[in-house]
Amino acid sequence: MAIVKFTSNLKRFYPNLTELQVEAETISKLLDLVNKEYPGIKNYIVDDQNNLRHHVNIFKNDIMINDRIKLSDKISTTDEILIVQALSGG
């Protein structure tokens, strides 16, 4: 199963947020499974059209995913996924 990790920024909204092991074929499906574990978290990651939000990045094995629109990047069972919500402001 792929391992999903989160930066601490999302812990403001999900204090019990921990890394997960998920079996999914694509980033899109992975986010659906993460959302089942942490209801509503997907709203912080994607917009109303299910596109990755501008202030969020997802890395697969330390490389940013290619498809920010359909989230169709393939995942294997040995992948490590990191979901990063950037901070804004000054």
Image (cartoon, rainbow, N blue to C red):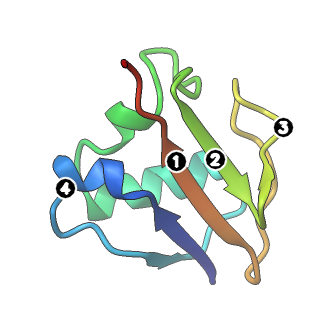
Circle 2 Cα neighbour tier, 10 Å, few/some/many (<14 / 14–19 / ≥20): many
Identified by mark 2, the residue type is Ile
Q: Gap in Å between the C-alphas at discs 1 and 2?
A: 6 Å
Note whether residue 26 is visible. no
Dot 3 or dot 2, earlier in sequence: 2
Judged left or right of residue 53, residue 88 is left
Q: Which residue is mark 3?
A: 66
Residue depicted at x 33% and y 74%: 18
Secondary structure beneath label 2: strand
Between disc 1 and disc 2, the foreground one is 1
Q: Is residue 30 above or below residue 64?
A: below
Identified by mark 3, the residue type is Asn
Judged left or right of residue 22, residue 8 is left
Dot 3 or dot 4, earlier in sequence: 4
Whether the residues at callouts 4 and 1 have beta carbons within 8 Å, the answer is: no
Q: Which mark is residue 84?
A: 1
Whether the residues at callouts 1 and 2 have beta carbons within 8 Å, the answer is: yes
Dot 4 or dot 1, earlier in sequence: 4
Secondary structure beneath label 4: loop
Q: Gap in Å between the C-alphas at discs 4 and 1?
A: 14 Å
The number of numbered discs placed on residues in the rendered structure image is 4
Residue depicted at x 37% and y 18%: 89
Secondary structure beneath label 3: loop
Task: Return the x and y of residue 58 as percentages of the image width and height.
Answer: 64, 47
Q: Which residue is mark 2?
A: 58
Q: Gap in Å between the C-alphas at discs 3 and 1?
A: 15 Å
